[in-house]
Amino acid sequence: MTAAEAGSPGPAAPSAGSPEAASTGAGLPSLGSRGEGWALGQLVLLGGAAAAGVCGASWSPAGGHARAAAASVIAIAGAGLLLGGGAGLGRQLTPFPKPVADGELRDDGVYGLVRHPMYGGALLGLLAWALVSSPLALAPLAAAGGFLEAKSRREEAWLVEQHPGYAAYRQRVRRRFVPYVW
């Protein structure tokens, strides 16, 4: 049974100017009716990371094998989060942060470990790319981390509005992006 099916009532949404709104994402802008601006910003950051990896200076050869091995493990973990998150959402998958109107709250599979596995997978993929391409790619990775943190808070504000059980789910699943880490 999903948290939404349990029907547990969620707390009232915080007012826009309150400190709670800032921490929950309710005070963050929608950037479009479905959050189109958030999706565009994410695309720009992913493109920036790709460009930084191609155009930036390469890593020094020292430690290249260890970096490549670490990148491989990180890339596999990232792909697992991306694929598990996409499969878990199924037809509810959308590039926009606002959940689909008739969607169900997912709290099983990879969503039982982290609340935003696809964002975590993207961040791990960017880290793997930076490790095999250029240290310059770490800058857009850091920016993407901050951006996805904010985007996920905006998304969670919408999820709390749509799914009464989301607040309880957020308490149960403490990690946002990467299991046992973040």
Image (spheres, grey):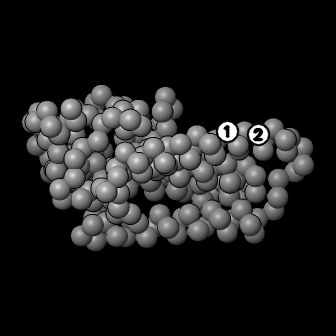
For mark 2, give the secondary structure: helix
Expressed as whole percent of the image width and height from the top left, the position of residue 165 reads 17, 37
Q: Is residue 159 above or below residue 46?
A: above
Label 2 crowd (10 A; few <14 / some 14-19 / many >=20): some
Report whether 169 appears left or right of 9: right
Q: From the image, tell me which residue sits under label 2.
A: 69
Taking the image as shown, residue 108 lies to the left or right of residue 138, namely left
Does residue 167 appear in the picture of this structure? Answer: no
Q: Residue furthest right?
A: 61
Residue highlighted by disc 1? 73
Q: CA distance from mark 2 to mark 1?
A: 6 Å
Task: Check disc 1 and report its element: helix, strand or loop.
Answer: helix
Percent across and percent down for residue 63 are 86, 41
- Residue sitting at x 22%, y 47%: 104
Q: Residue at x 41, y 37 (%)?
A: 110
Give the quadrant of the N terminus.
top left
Residue 29 image position (x, y, % from top left): 28, 63
The residue under label 2 is which amino acid type?
Answer: Ala
Q: Nearer the viewer, residue 90 or 48?
A: 90
Q: Quadrant of residue 111?
A: top left
Please indicate whether residue 145 sits to the left or right of residue 156 in the image. Answer: right
Above-or-below relation of 24 to 182: below
- Asked whether the beta carbons under mark 2 and mark 1 sit within 8 Å of each other, the answer is yes
